[in-house]
Every structure is written in C-alpha cells, then in structure tokens.
Amino acid sequence: MRTAIADVLLGGGVLLVLGAIAGTVAMQDALDRLHFAGPASLGGILIAAAALVRSGPSTIALKAGLLALFILATSPVLAHFTARAIREWERGTWKLTADEQERARR
Amino acid sequence: MNIWLAAATVLLAATAPLGWLAFRRSPADGIVAIELAGIVVALAMLAIAEGTNRQPFGDLALILAALSFGGSLVFARFLELGERDE
C-alpha cells in the first residue's frame, strides 16, 4: 500500500514538473516563462513526499524533507528577484511607468 | 530499473528543452530556464538516491539545490546590472 501511494505521489510530482517545463518552453515572454516555472516546486514537494512515504523515518527521508522545505522557501524569493531583474533589464527600471500607474489607479 | 530511476531519467531528459532555451533565447529567458533546470536536476538526484538506495546522493541533491539558488541569484544580479542589446 505504501509503495502504491509513493508511486502515485512520484508520478504526480514528475507530471507537475514536466508541465512546468512544457509551459516554460512554450511561452514567448520571459516573465510568462517565470510564471510557469513555479509549479516545479510543488512537484518537488510531491516527489519528496513520495520518498518520505516509501522510506519511512530514515536519513534519506530527512534529506528529502529538507530539500522540499528548501525549494519551498527559496522558490518565491528567486522568482521575485528574477522578475525584478528581468524588468530592470528590459525597461531600465523596475518601478511603474506613468502609464502603468494610471492603469493601476483605474 | 525501478520507478524511481525511470522518474530520474525522465526528469533529466526533460532538461534538454531548457538547455535549448538557455542557449538560443535571450539572457532573461536563459536565467528562467537555468533556475528551473536547477530544481529539476536536484529532484532527479533525489530520485536516483531513492532508486539506488544510496543516501549520499541525497546530500548531492541538497547541495545542488543550495548552489543552484545562489548561482541563480548571481545571474539575476548580473542581468539587472547589464545592458540590453537592441
């Protein structure tokens, strides 16, 4: 039973990661690609959960849990930092332009 | 080959399109591809560790995730400081 649950979690995790890769490759704009890269961290959590279920309390399960926590904690930080860098690279500033401020007010 | 090694193979093969993206598209697209590839390869290492029952590969996955995070931050900072070729 544990093996079956682990297999389902692993399959779901791999599918999520593949979906994230497909979305990232298919999009045209860097910020859109970044948006689609997000689900990969959720896939990572599923894969780590599969390792936890399969191995039970063990060193490898601890490492899997640590990896999942690390990815979960750093992924949003990295996405934000990268999005800001891309915007700065594309427009010279990350701040809103006058047009964008006007649109945001409406 | 068990299901974990099969998953690792699929994950590693799936990094090929990301490599193409990093080589052929703009630097901004490349950074996104490299960030995603770092996560995918770390997960593949975890799957290899589980599939071969060798715990040291789990350490490699953790170290790779940490270094990939730091490297991506540095790449993003360089992108931010660099100028765009028109």
Image: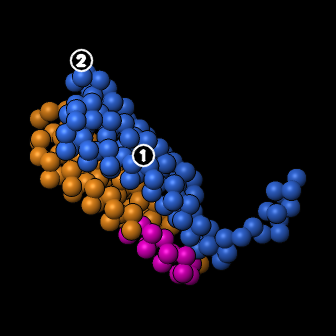
Chain colours: A blue, B orange
Residue at horizontal 51 percent and vertical 54 percent from the top: A76
Q: Nearer the viewer, residue B35 or A76?
A: A76
Residue at horizontal 39 percent and vertical 48 percent from the top: A69
Q: Is residue A61 magenta?
A: no
The residue carrying mark 2 is A1
The residue carrying mark 1 is A40
* Mark closer to the chain start, 2 or 1: 2
Say whether marks 2 and 1 touch (CB < 8 Å). no
Quarter of the rendering occupied by the N terminus of chain B: top left
Q: Position of residue B51 (x, y in %)?
A: 15, 39
Q: Position of residue A70 (x, y in %)?
A: 38, 53
Q: Which residues are magenta?
A: B71-85
| Horizontal arrangement in the rendering, residue A5 relative to residue A92 (left or right) | left
Task: Identify the main secondary structure in magenta.
Answer: helix
Q: Is residue B79 magenta?
A: yes
Residue at horizontal 88 percent and vertical 53 percent from the top: A106
